Image: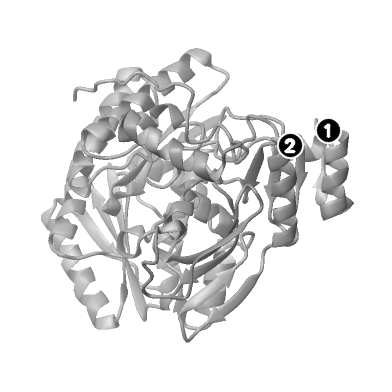
Amino acid sequence: MLDKKIRRKLIKLVGNTNFKDTNEARLVYSYDATPNFQAMPDAVIMPETKEHVQGILKICNDAGIPLIPRGSGTNLSAGTCPTQGGIVLTFNHMNQIIEIDEENLTVTVQPGAITLQIIQAVEAKGLFYPPDPSSMKISTIGGNINECSGGLRGLKYGVTKDYVLGLEVVLPNGDIVKTGGKLAKDVAGYDLTNLFVGSEGTLGIVTEAILKLIPKPETKKTLLALFEDMNDAAKTVSAIIANKIIPATLEFLDKPTCEVVEDFAKVDLPTHVEAVLLIEQDGPSFIVERDIQRISEICLEGKALSVNIAQSKEEAEALSTARRSALSALARMKPTTILEDATVPRSKISDMVRAINEIAKKHDVKICTFGHAGDGNLHPTCLTDARDKEEMHRVELAFEDIFAKAIELGGTITGEHGVGEMKSPYLAWKIGEEGVRAMKAVKDAFDPNGIMNPGKIFAKDTRKRVVVHS
């Protein structure tokens, strides 16, 4: 628990209503969406202004109290679980869309703004913010920035880091740093903006962000291709890209995922085939029409059983919504759902899908696979029960094999979920011990007292590297 003197200082700063340390309030913020991670914070604070954030950081930095910035807690790598105690900062009160600048094509927001609300606000003005994490209905932009969130549109449009132009960040000592701005070009020194994006709250706290917008696409078409063989579907993904077509969305779902999602969403998603590709293209009508027709041909050449183009906006939206609900649908099947995001080069998709299936058999675990196949970001998802310790051990070994295989294929341990605490023992597998030391040096420079989200990204020990033969 917090020292009484520190507690009084914090309450004086933010007010009684914005400081919570009851057991009930602490319990709510003791976990995020990551299975098997939970720890009670000492308190929860809801700042209303950047001055509140400054004051909180100064007090905690002087006292060595851990601080964990948190959005909506939808992250999947234990990035906001307060495993070392301390104070959780949540930004419910700092949730405004400050400005939509139609001349400079930017939107300026506070960290607690909900992602979907930002998307809807700019689309009402004919503009477009492309990053679309599946959790966008409830995730906050601050959380998206801390995790560098991706989404279904990542193939064509990129991820969060590609749209953050400038940040206002409070450092652990209370200093405010402003990076970037409403600029198309800016090479004045180190790129601090991109350093903070994806830093998982370990360097400072974002209090304001300037995001890039683009014109809203004129039209969109959606296509569903069915495959009897998963390898054929994976090879078709590579063939589409090789034909120099970049769809807005190129999603992959295996048969077990389709069965569960259809039972959940009831949108006539096929369940009799081994794999489904959900493909969207947007842009000017003549380009969309041309690309969709060519994609249809490539799918059929790739041994698709059938190719169906959505005949209405409602049908297309239903299919996209079904894909976004995949995790929710799978979570109904077993008490514990562990979703990962091993990522490989697009050309290695078929190799990775095959390896995941072989690894699941090797360890006798159930893994459903879906994901952003167009950018190589697959989501192998294990349905299990955390109370079964023996099975959970096999699940852990299976995911270690999956991470190792992804790296072997030129990929990474995480494409969009972040390292957090869950994947920190594997970071050195990807970047080497030298890379870890370089990252720690950056962390120490910004946060010498180690108060910012401690225990995340950097593990005490690296897991022994496994070798996977498949």
Residue 37 drawn above or below residue 220: above
Q: CA distance from mark 1 to mark 2?
A: 10 Å
Quadrant housing the C terminus:
top left
Out of 358 and 396, give the one closest to the viewer. 396
Q: Residues within 10 Å of mark 1 (few under 14, many from 20)?
A: few
Q: Residue at x 52, y 51 (%)?
A: 146
Label 1 or label 2, whichever comes before in sequence order: 1
* Residue 267 makes an appearance in the image: no
x, y percent for residue 117: 59, 68
x, y percent for residue 312: 39, 73
x, y percent for residue 280: 32, 65
In the displayed structure, does residue 312 sit left or right of residue 409?
Answer: right
Quadrant housing the N terminus:
top right
Q: Residue at x 38, y 38 (%)?
A: 438
Could you tell me which secondary element the residue under label 2 belongs to?
Answer: helix
Could you tell me which secondary element the residue under label 1 belongs to?
Answer: loop
Q: Residue at x 45, y 21 (%)?
A: 461
Residue 418 drawn above or below residue 186: above
Residue 282 drawn above or below residue 300: below
In the displayed structure, does residue 456 sit left or right of residue 373?
Answer: right
Name the quadrant containing residue 228: top left
Q: Amino acid at mark 2?
A: Ala
In the displayed structure, does residue 393 sit left or right of residue 173?
Answer: left
Residue where numbered disc 2 is placed: 63
In the displayed structure, does residue 376 sit left or right of residue 35?
Answer: left
Label 1 vs label 2, nearer the camera: 2
* Residue 316 makes an appearance in the image: yes
Out of 168 and 414, give the one closest to the viewer. 168
Q: Amino acid at mark 1?
A: Asp
Residue where numbered disc 1 is placed: 3
